[in-house]
Amino acid sequence: MNNRGCIEYNPGTVAYLYETHLHTAGVSKCAVSRGADYIAGYIDKGYSGIIVTDHFFNGHSGLSRKLPWKEWVNQFYRGYEETKEEGDKQGLDVFFGWEETFNECDDYLIYGLDKEWLLDHPEVTTWTRGEQYKAVKEAGGCVVQAHPFRQRWYIERLVLSAGCVDAVEVANGAHDDFSFDACACRYAKHIGKPMLTGSDIHDVSLIHHGVIFGVYLNKKLESISDFVNVICNNEIAGLKADESRFEIRGKVKINIPVEIRDKNDKITGKHWKEFI
């Protein structure tokens, strides 16, 4: 398998497996498991590491937005710190990222930046998609669009940010409609972006049920910056996800408006069917 093939990869004994999308209780409002609770399960399943990506300020955060910025960031970072502390004890690498949301419609995984960067950039909460992408790239990070074709009752429209992302999450463990993943896979191929898969896990019980995804890498990550380089250089060795998730069966149904946005974060006149 290769990343462009969008099917499960059999790593043999040479690849390292990483969870790319994970939420912790106390920080992400929708999570039921604390970060430390995940560690043993991921070790048991053969993972080399996990990336904590709690919901950020404009998403489904469980933190009060009335807090002073420094206090808000410190509390936000605790989800990662508590997870890493337990990971260090048990021997699982833990890295930091976050998931930002725009208008309760589209979500983005941010990798490569740290607590100090957040403390220095309180304006991050007011950025557009384009401003976010520019600032994250200038700081050495990267932006991945999460589950771009997900449809749920609270999502008013789909936004495909084709010009302001470095990669696309093409399989997500938090939804059962596989057509979302199949469309995301085709979309990523069309715009020529690397593909990721992530569990979007909120509950440790899903590990024991085997509902976890991730990416295979040929080299062990020493830092989250290493992961940024892997993404930007399109060096993901493989995707952990069931091949059936990438098969479109029947007619694709999208029942809400769709926006295609370019590198300037401007809405184009293109139709979503052109991308899948």
Image (cartoon, grey):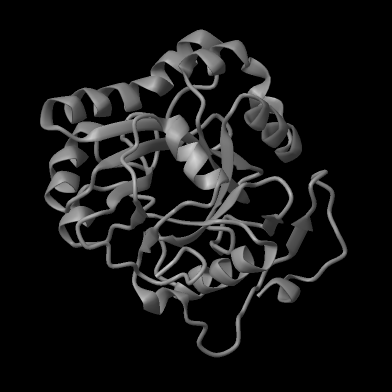
- Where is residue 155? Give x, y as percent: 61, 56
Q: Going 33% across and 47% down the picture, which residue do you hit?
A: 19
Q: Going 53% across and 52% down the picture, which residue do you hit?
A: 234
Instruction: Locate the N terminus by quadrant.
Output: bottom left
Whether residue 94 is situated above or below residue 202 in the rendered picture:
above
- From the viewer's perspective, is 95 left or right of 36? right
Q: Going 68% across and 19% down the picture, which residue do you hit?
A: 123
Whether residue 230 is situated above or below residue 154 in the rendered picture:
above
Q: Quadrant of residue 29?
A: top left
- Where is residue 224? Give x, y as percent: 42, 32
Instruction: Locate the C terminus by quadrant.
Output: bottom right
Whether residue 66 is situated above or below residue 174 in the rendered picture:
above
Residue 91 visible: yes
Whether residue 244 is situated above or below residue 201 in the rendered picture:
below
- Where is residue 122? Give x, y as percent: 63, 16
Q: Going 26% across and 26% down the picture, which residue do you hit?
A: 84
Q: Quadrant of residue 108?
A: top right
Residue 97 visible: no
- From the viewer's perspective, is 228 left or right of 262? left
- From the viewer's perspective, is 51 left or right of 195? left
Q: Residue furthest right?
A: 269
- Where is residue 69? Give x, y as percent: 55, 12
Instruction: Name the foreground residue: 259 vs 240.
Output: 240
